[in-house]
Structures are given as C-alpha cells and as structure tokens.
Amino acid sequence: MKQLLFVAVSLAMPALAFASTEPSTAIVDLSNTVYGYLGIALFVAAYILVPLENKIHLRKSKPLMFAAGVIWLLLGLAYYRIGDLHTAHAAIKNNLLEFAEIFLFLLAAMTYINALEERNVFQALRAFLVSRGFSLRSIFWITGLLAFFISPVADNLTTALIMGAVAMAVGGKNTKFVALACINIVVAANAGGAFSPFGDITTLMVWTKGKAEFHEFFRLFLPSLVHWLVPALLMSFAVGKEPPEEHQEDVKLKYGAFGIMFLFLATITTAVCFHNFLNLPPGAGMMLGLGYLGLFSYHIKLHEGNLKRFDYILGTRSEETFTPLRAIAMSKKPIGDIIEKFDEAIFAIDTNHKITHWNKVMEKLTGIKAADAVGTNRQWSPFYKEQRPSLADLCISYLPEDAIATHYEAGMRRKNPYVEDAYDASGFYPHMGEEGRWLSLSAAPIKDRDGKVIGAVEILQDFTERRKQAHHFDIMQKVARAEWDTLMFFYGVILCVGGLAQFGYLASVSTLMYHDLGATTANVLVGGIGAVLGNIPILFAVLAMDPVMSHGQWLLLTLTVGIGGNLLSVGSAAGVALMGTARGKYTFGVHLKWVPAIILGYVASIWCHLILNAKLM
C-alpha cells in the first residue's frame, strides 16, 4: 500500500508538458518503414505488461523504459538512413525537457505526500471517520463525498487510498459493503479529479498545454458531480443501514502536521502563480515549494531534537520527570526501601565509589545482575570500554561542576534546576546493545540527617527510540522515498509516445478520429479507449496530435478521459490501487457488475456538459 500511496502523488498537481513538434523537429512520415513497425510492436508489448505488474512482479517502469530507449534508437536509425542527423536529436531533447519538468514537479509533490503521511495526517482522518459510529450507508455516502471533494486538491489516487482504508476498516468482513464502497470511492475520486488541474495527471496535461485556463476547469464541476451521483444513487440501495463493527483507533497528529498542510497549499498556489502570471513552468514553482518544506523540516528537527543540543533530552524534561531523583536524594529512609518503587534504571554508590544498590530496571537496561554489580566499582562497565567515572561518581567529587565539565561536552550537561546539588547529562553510548543507546543521566549526592554526603544515586532513562523517531524526519529521506518507479514510468510513456509521434503515426490517427468521426464522437471514444489502454498515454497522444478543436471540445476531452477510467476497475490508477489493497473484496468482476450504472453516469455527465457549456462547443 505504501508504494501505491506514492503513486498517488503522480496524479497530484500542475506540471506536465508534452511532446511538441517545433519547426526544427518537423515530422517526416516514417510510419511505413520497418523501424516504425518495430517501434509500434515494441510499445504495445511493453504496455501490455503494465497492468500485469502485480501478477508477474515486473515493475511497470522497466518495460516502458526499455521500449523508450529502443524506439528512439530505431528512430535515429530511420533518420540516419535518409541522411538526417539533426531532427531526431532535436526531437528527443524536446521530449527530455518535457520529462524534466514533470520529474521536478512530481518529485516535490511526492515529497509532500510522504511528509504528510509521516506526520499521521491521513491516518488521523481515517481514525476520525472510523470512530464516529455512522451506519454503513452513511459511510458509503461520506467516503464518496469526501473522495469527490478531496481529490481535486490531494489527487484522485491518494484520496481513493485514504477513503478505501476507511471503508475496509468499517466494513470488516462485510465483503459486499467493502466492494460497493470501493467502487463508489473510485468513481467519486476520478470524477472529482476531472474538474481540477490538480486532481489528475490528465487535467494537468490539458492545463499546462494551455488548452484551458485554470478557472475554466470548474465548468466541469456539475458534469463531474453528475457522473458520481448517478451510479452512487443506484448502488446505495444495495447498501444496508446496519451499524458497522466497532473500531477504536487513537491517532494523534505529529508536531508540524498543520504547518506542512499549509505549506502544501502554499506550494500549490506558488505553482499556479508561476504558470498563470509569470509564464514559468509549474515545476519550478513546485521546487520552490519544496524549499518551503525544507526550511520547515529544519524547524521540526530542532523541535524534536534531531540536532545534538542539550534541550533535546535535558531541556524537554519537566519537573515531574525528576520525582524519583528528589525522592531518593531527600529521603531519610534506607535507599533500598524505595529504589524498586520506580520504573527508571537506578543505582547507588557509597563514598568509596562502591555500588550499594542496583535495581531490576538497571539489570534490564545493562544486562548485568545486581548480584554481580553490588560491592564492585564497575558502574562504568556497561557504558564505556575503559574505566572512567560515572555521573554519580562525579557528584561526590570536590567541585563536582568542574569535574563534570571535563567528562561531558558543553550542551550535553547542566546543573539540575529542580533538585538541589543534582546534575544532568546526556549522550550516546555506542557500546550498549547492538546499535548503541541514547541515555539521559541524572545524579545527586545522598546525605545523612546531619547533611553529610554518604554516597550518590544515579537515574538513567533510555531516549533511543524517541531520538530515532525525531531523526527520521529528514526532508532528504522523504525525497529518497519518492515513488521512483512512477517517475520512470512517466519517462517511458513520454519518450515512447513522443517517439511514435515523430515516426508520424499520431498524425494518421488524428486524421482518422477527429476529421472523419468528428470531435465530439472522437472525444467520447477516447474516454472509453482510455479505460482499456490507460488515460495518461491516450491523452498524451491526443495532445501530441494537437487536433483543431473548440474550447468546449478540449474540456469534453478532459472530462471523458478523467471519468472514462471508471468504466473498468483497471481503467484508472485509483481502481488498480484499491483492487490491490482490498484484494478478494473489490475485484474486476464485482466492478463489472456495476458498469451499466457507471456508463449511465458517463453518458449523463457528457450530456450535462454539452448542455451547460454549449456556447463553448
């Protein structure tokens, strides 16, 4: 599911550009050459392997990357045979520039999605919905409604995965409900993504290609809403009103979650402004937004103590955490009576620096039994390779503050602000366990009734796991965890389609569809074809053909390609993703049963667009 969540980002925001035919890359018709035939055959073979990824365990990017390379090799040979050494070179440079813009854009978007997931944003939304006690039919409508309105911002695949997790958590063993809810979520997410430049990679293509202005996509709101509501209404009658199984899931947002959400919206705004007002690539705006996140991530690291500063461990401890130290240091009772009452690792020494007490938590932390420790002066041995004084030893030294300063570096030591004559320190102990431990140490002298020092006590707390959690929030790690398979998949698609366009195939197809059949019929068919072959390469091909159409026809194409993937469960990334996470419940066959209802919604949405936007047609 993790990989699927990263694929989600690929459908997330503005920044695609496409294969173009500049004057320097004028197309020579090579479609009837053996090189062209081989290129077509190779692309078809490679794309057939894409939907089989989960069965044959071959990542979708690999066959397309291979096909892209070979197609351009064939294209180069074809141009070489006619004595042209420049056209193919210029054409592939244009395609590589298109991919570079996509790559930078999606890399930034994926990093934001990773950061939001790590801060528990999606998990908290799921837990909230699951714990509200809605009926199954209510959950059906709520998840669909949220999918429709979240996908225009968060993208359709991410939204489908979040809402799908809610449906599965609520539905439990109710296979019928999970299946219907997943179909509804897929339809709603794809429909919601169709009326926003940020909701689907296909809408991004249309927007960045300049076929529609940013605000014009919202003309598709009502047609998209109709497409979701028609099948949702029909399916809702098959969903019962019984309450779901009870679920309790307590998920808290981590520090900085709201800040990252705000920066995500600011990044979207930046990308839009770059494109609309400055005529700059949206990808450049997204990379600026990644810079916002980079600076904010530094703030989070400071707050959570990822840097080596005293206030990571020492400064974040409240007065209550020193209750055991105060109780032992100020008690007039024998230390043995109270040392086992606390959950911290504690040991005590006398003025001869011999161990007098070694509690059970100390045994667990160090692996050394009390029987082997008490009576010795080897309190240093669990922490260091060579003998050196512990913090407790230094507390009963002359001028303890000076002695402590020689053994603990600045920033990792202090005088305890809550307990008299006590001191704190923290540090990493590489010899403890297999990977070392981060410990916080607090020590204080033990005095008798007359105030004479008779020994010292030291309390240790293990902060290793907390430090690891803080260390994990690193912006570069979020970049490294981007879905590279998806990025390389887009490389393959862009280079393959761009190569075939340079052979001259798309010009022929464009004439057949948009001249002979007419724009409306062609655009409706493109949506259906996209459900089988994938909406991204289909729309990419149409944009590469660049047929002469009205504004309304380009919006119709955007609508049909966006919602056409709902006709089959394998027709969109959201459908494929949920089939993987709801394996055995939401299947191709189950989706197929409701295709008539979805087709009805498809036709109704097109009819709605043709009426509402008739002036643009």
Image (spheres, rainbow, N blue to C red):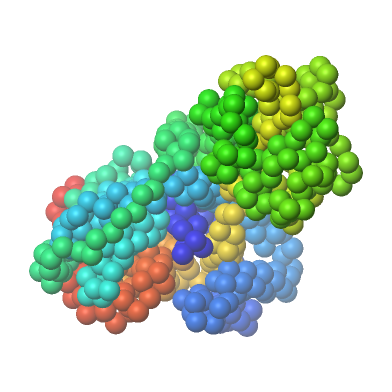
Say above or below: 78 vs 142. below
Residue closest to the eye, 434 or 157: 434
Query: Which residue is rendered at x = 61% and y = 81% of the image?
Result: 38
Res 1 seen here: yes
Query: Which residue is rendered at x = 42% and y = 42% of the image?
Result: 253
Q: State the residue lying farthest toward the right.
A: 386
Residue closest to the eye, 611 or 291: 291
Query: Which residue is rendered at x = 40% and y = 55% of the image?
Result: 158
Res 203 seen here: no
Q: Quadrant of residue 93?
A: bottom right
**Residue 270 appears left or right of 97:** left
Q: Position of residue 591 (x, y in %)?
A: 27, 76
Q: Position of residue 304 (x, y in %)?
A: 57, 35
Q: Quadrant of residue 475?
A: top right
Q: Position of residue 362 (x, y in %)?
A: 66, 47
Residue closest to the eye, 237 or 109: 237
Disc tally is: 0
Q: Position of residue 327 (x, y in %)?
A: 56, 29
**Residue 106 appears left or right of 366:** left
Query: Which residue is rendered at x = 54% and y = 62% of the image?
Result: 486
